[in-house]
Amino acid sequence: MSQTPKLLEIEDLHVSVDGQEILKGINLAIDAGEVHAIMGPNGSGKSTLSYTLSGREGYEVTRGAVRYLGRDLFAMEPHERAAAGIFLGFQYPVEIPGVSNMNFLRTAVNAIRKANGQEEMPAAEFLKLVREKARALEMDPEMLKRSVNVGFSGGEKKRNEMVQMAVLNPKLAILDETDSGLDIDALKEVSRGINAMRGPEHAILLITHYQRLLEYVVPDVVHVLVRGRIVTSGGKELAHELEREGYAAFTEAA
């Protein structure tokens, strides 16, 4: 009997940006139901990994392979990856003037449904869904009428992104330093949104500098990424060690 493929399998991944090698042999496997955290100092390649997985231009894969649910990820266009259930949460969510949150979300939901051979979601059903997810994250319903992230505070942008994630319901959520710039109250709200995604059909890849997010979103595995390589992996206690000791010992080893 053939085994069910891992949700995400990364093998010997090398990636260059503008001719400079950033990722130098990443190996990582994530299964449905798991939360993995990647920690590392600035310039270690954390964001490069997230952008490569999502299909951003300018990130050249020079060696290695990535499979998503058994499929060659690099044979899929960015919109195909999104339709297949991959979500990228940005460190700095972009503003989209003139496009309301509601229209943005409805367009995204229906594009994904169309790609998967489904009919558009009825307007009333969609409205109920969005309001329900916004309420769960204590987001003012009036913000749904505003342009995407325009005039939002840092915490509001991240909360808005959590609403987007909840509505789109991805199989794999890649969150690139989603805790960046958040005060403790906003961090708790964002963590609640991340924890709401946890389940047997979903996987989450958290990319962060700091251990504090992992106090609220407890990972199954913590990986330390230094100079383009994962140098060690462990449990939550590894994040506490990094908080106490920093990255110096791992940087020297790398």
Image (cartoon, rainbow, N blue to C red):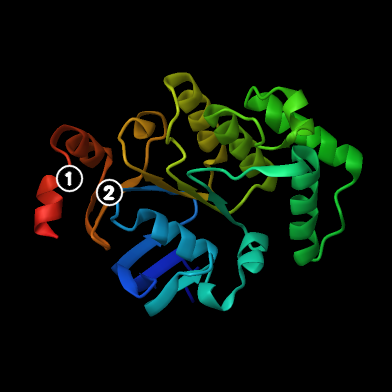
Asked whether 84 or 45 is in front, the reply is: 45
Q: Which mark is residue 189?
A: none
| Left or right, 195 with reference to 169 | left
Vertical comparison of 28 with 96: above or below: below
Image disc number at residue 40 = 2
Q: In terms of depth relative to the viewer, which is nearer, 39 or 133? A: 39
Position of 209 relative to 73 (above/below): above
The residue drawn where x is 77% and y is 44% is 99
Above or below, comparing residue 154 to residue 138 in the picture: below
Name the secondary structure under disc 2: loop
Q: Residues within 10 Å of mark 2 (few under 14, many from 20)?
A: many
| Distance from the alpha carbon under mark 2 to that under mark 1 | 7 Å
* Quadrant of the frame with the C terminus: bottom left
* Left or right, 243 with reference to 108: left
The tag earlier along the polypeptide, 2 or 1, is 2
Q: Name the residue located 43 percent from the left edge and 31 percent from the top edge.
A: 181
Q: Is residue 30 in view?
A: no
Contact between labelled residues 1 and 2, with CB atoms less than 8 Å apart:
yes
The foreground one among 85 and 46 is 46
Question: Where does the image place residue 138, in percent across and percent down from the top left?
Answer: 64, 22
Amino acid type at mark 1: Tyr
Residue 59 showing in the rendered view: yes
Which residue is rendered at x = 60% and y = 39% of the image?
A: 161
Q: Position of residue 13 (x, y in %)?
A: 35, 72
Residue 81 image position (x, y, % from top left): 61, 65
Please tell me whether mark 1 sits on a helix, a strand or a loop: loop
Q: Amino acid at mark 2?
A: Gly
Residue designated by label 1: 247
Give the total number of marks visible in the rendering: 2
Q: Position of residue 4 (x, y in %)?
A: 50, 68
